Image: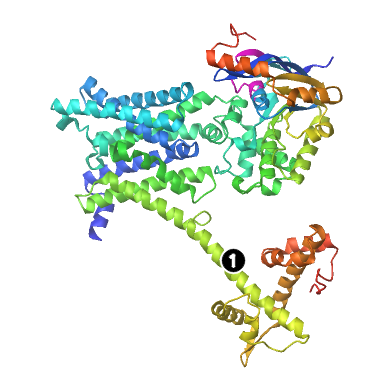
Amino acid sequence: MPKSAVEVHNLTVSYSQRPVLWDVDFSLPEGKLIAIVGPNGSGKTTLLKSIMGLTPMSGGFVRIFDQPLDEVRSQVSYVPQRESVDWDFPARVRDVVLMGRYRPKNLLSRLSKTDREVADWALDQVRMREFSQRQISQLSGGQQQRVFIARSLAQQAKLYLMDEPFAGVDAASERAILDLLMQLKESGKTLLIVHHDLNTVRQYFDWVVLMNTRLVAAGPVEEVFTDANLQAAYGGQLTVLSKVADRVKEGGFPVREKKVKS
Amino acid sequence: MNNLLQFLSLSDPNVRMVVLGATLLGAGAGLVGVFTLLRKRALLGDAVAHSILPGVCLAFMVGQSKNPFVLLLGALIAGWLSLLAMDYLVRRTKLKADGVIGLVLSVFFGLGIWLLTIIQQSGAASQSGLDKFLFGKAASITSQDVNMFTWVVLGLVLVLLLFYKGFKLIAFDQDFARSVGMPVRLLEFLLSTITVLSIAVGIQAVGVVLMASLLIAPAAAARYWTDRLSVMLLLAAGMGIIAAWSGAYVSFAAPSMPTGPWIVMALALLTGISMLWAPKRGILGRSLRQWRYARKIALENVLKILFQLEERSGMAGKGYSRVSILEHREIEPGPLNMVLRRLKRKAWATEINSLWRLTEEGLTEARQIVRRHRLWELYLHERLNLPADHVHPGAEAMEHLLTPELEEALQRDLGYPVTDPHQSPIP
């Protein structure tokens, strides 16, 4: 049994009382290219954020490489949604990629020559080297996404969490990004990717996490990516569940009686 | 002129204090304001400035002194309380950020005015000089004040230098900063503290009401001139300093003029100039580029017409009158005269007996435009499956825009074609 890369235990997250993730529980193996798939508002981004510790959980816990996140943080790289930042920020492409080399340890010191070499290497990987001095607001959507991925590569992690890297990118960028993800997988990295295009799931990914507020299924694509599971994730609302969620919100009940310690 | 020299020499100790004080405040607020602006907290800065007033008043009432450090402490506490209050209200109530900012600003400011009234009625106002916090009184900056400003500004420059990378990261992408384990809360705390500090000292020059401008305007103006954060910081500090000197000079030259408001006026002027003149982002720069582009299009269109007239007649060397050029209706008579003059100047066309014809160089240029036009038509026709009679308008625009590299790519993609969709040769 290979070591698990990401283990999510009964994870529950609520926004202003209403649960957006409800008892999500799965374990993902190392070295796979894994998609998180589900309809809009099904909590995909929230799942990624809570794995990364960016969203307070109301229950459950997450372990990465069988350890708490803080122990292995330097081996995890997170790529937020492209729209989550203001691209009019005064920075050039290389500045952003260099941010992938920022660590709490080097917060007060200058970046080293190695850091700069790694950043250039990462830019080569996404085929953006010639844009390294370009102002980031002048890039196309696909190029911006590649800059984000280069920043992530510069972190030289073992686990990559990416939020919609294929959203709103041109065909050339999609190809370049996909090649890169495949390469990373070949070299033994684990990639967990929020994905919106159901048509390409079979073609791109090994594993899939299907969800809609709760987990529908998680496993190898050929076993899990079935019509029945898709129906369960996308077809019809879980009316009872959403009614209970509404009641939780109205009543101001906690989702858990006591906070569960990990 | 004489009094400008006298001002610049800083020989008057009073002037020296005012200029020194305002310079420190302008530079400090300019630097910190860059991060306020980039983190989209401009309104927050205004709210903090107003919220500082009750802190200053309470510090005076409790401490019974106008020692600037005591007042600064009061200002710092009140500024921080207002930040915490806003943060709490945004997270815990249904109110949105703008509503919360408006609410906290007016409640704190109201409290401040009330306390100020109490102090004034107690008769201590005249010596307290607290009213200067309302509209600022740069002209009465003392050496004791300058002493305090120096320490505060030095401190915030030091914090900015030390934590520059961290501040840059949380300003651009806070989630990412947290994901790599950066001490985001500490960084935010430091940034907020130096912001409150710079506001607390800044209001002594321009007052509570105008403080937001001292904080935001230098950064907003600096943003127009650069794409780099480090340069933007230096420019913003520079703008703050220029404004400080200008304001101080105006009130030196015309003693009835208040310094603070003139500092703000100078900042407004600098921002206005930046909006207009900045090379890439400025309004004038953009219009200039559009105007140049229009000129280029007009010139290239006339080249093309002359080329086509020659092509159609089937013989070289014959010239064409203005009337036959105008028949093409792509250009008005007025602009045509201008374009013809430019063609003559460039030696791309010659005029003999009011007949115009292209020179060798002109012919080369014209061929290039016609080639691009026809290549693009062919591209639209073959690759985008547009019918032959729909491709002309698109090519009219693209012929001016294609670069040699794009042209080469088109040639390659289309297999070095010889005719366009209308069977005209591609020159």
Please report the residue visible at 27 percent of the width from the left and 51 percent of the height from the top: B249
Foreground pick, B225 / A205: A205
Instruction: Specify start and end residues of the magenta stretch as a single range.
Output: A49-61
Q: In this view, does A27 lie to the left or right of B75?
A: right
Point out residue A137 in the picture as x, y percentages from the top left corner: 59, 46
Q: State the SS at label 1.
A: helix
Foreground pick, B38 / B187: B38
- The chain identifier of the residue carrying mark 1 reads B
- Quarter of image, res B402: bottom right
Q: Mark 1 points at which residue?
A: B293
Point out residue A44 in the picture as x, y percentages from the top left corner: 68, 26
Q: In which quarter of the image is the C terminus of chain A?
A: top right
Q: Is residue B47 left or right of residue B172?
A: left
Vertically, is B25 above or below B377? Answer: above
Point out residue B254 in the picture as x, y percentages from the top left corner: 21, 53
Point out residue B108 in the picture as x, y percentages from the top left corner: 32, 27
Report how many numbered discs are placed on residues in the image.
1
- Residue B271 seen by the camera: yes
Please report the residue visible at 74 percent of the width from the left and 68 percent of the height from the top: B372
Q: Please, what is the three-letter code of the amino acid marked with disc 1?
A: Tyr
Foreground pick, B32 / A245: A245
Please report the residue visible at 65 percent of the width from the left and 73 percent of the height from the top: B300
Q: Is residue A120 magenta?
A: no
Q: In this view, does B112 lie to the left or right of B402?
A: left
